[in-house]
Image (cartoon, helix red, strand yellow):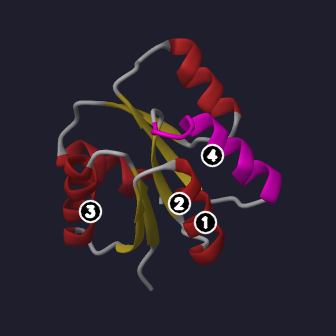
Amino acid sequence: MSKKVLIVDDSLYMRTLIKDALTEEGYEIVGEAPNGETAIDLIMKFEPDLITLDNILPDMIGTDVLRKLKEEGLDAKVIMISAVGQQSVINEGIELGATEYMIKPFTAEDLVELVNRII
């Protein structure tokens, strides 16, 4: 059975890059969200196995989405993705339940390797 993935990023380019890389690897992309509110709706609807979560979204930040997941008791694996490599942000994400943290820019190969390792 293929693993369900939700992609959360305000950049269409990044969503496409992630989607193409993971689809090729056999993962099922159940949805794409350009903002936090849509992400939370899709997470509740699909309960994905894995979420790639951009930290800077138009309506909230990735850690807000993580807080909501925690409140709802959902235990999807989360890879936080951000151009911001600040240790405090990384630590907060991990404390709130993110499984891994990836800093932009990254290659499709790096992403696939990380996803395969944590799934």
Q: Is residue 22 magenta?
A: no
User: Which numbered disc flags the more N-terminal residue, 2 or 3?
Assistant: 3
Q: Amino acid at mark 2?
A: Thr
Residue at the image position 81 percent from the left and 51 percent from the top: 71
Residue 18, above or below 60:
below
- Marking on residue 57: none
**Amino acid type of the residue tagged 3 in the rendering:** Lys
Element marked by disc 2 = helix
> Residue 65, labelled with which disc?
4
Q: Residue at left 72%, top 42%?
A: 67
User: Nearer the N terminus, badge 3 or badge 1?
Assistant: 3
Q: Write down the quadrant of residue 26 in the picture.
A: bottom left
Q: Amino acid at mark 4?
A: Val
Tell me the amino acid under the disc marked 1.
Answer: Asp
Q: Which mark is residue 38?
A: 2
User: Magenta residues?
Assistant: 57-72
Mark 1 and mark 4 lie on one chain; the one further toward the N terminus is 1
**At 55% across and 38% down in the image, what residue appears?**
62
Reading the chain from its start, which is encountered first: label 4 or label 3?
Answer: 3
**Residue 41, label in figure:** 1
Q: Are marks 1 and 2 in contact (CB under 8 Å)?
A: yes
Residue ID for mark 3: 19
* Nearer to us in this view, 32 or 90: 32
User: Mark 1 near mark 4, Cβ–Cβ under 8 Å?
Assistant: no
**CA distance for labels 1 and 4:** 11 Å
Q: Point out the image quarter for the N terminus.
A: bottom left
**Marks 4/3: CA–CA distance:** 20 Å
In this view of the protein, which residue sits in the foreground, 26 or 44?
44
Locate residue 81: give its quadrant: top left
60 in the magenta segment: yes
| Percent x, y of residue 18 | 27, 55
For discs 3 and 1, the disc positioned in front in the rendered view: 1
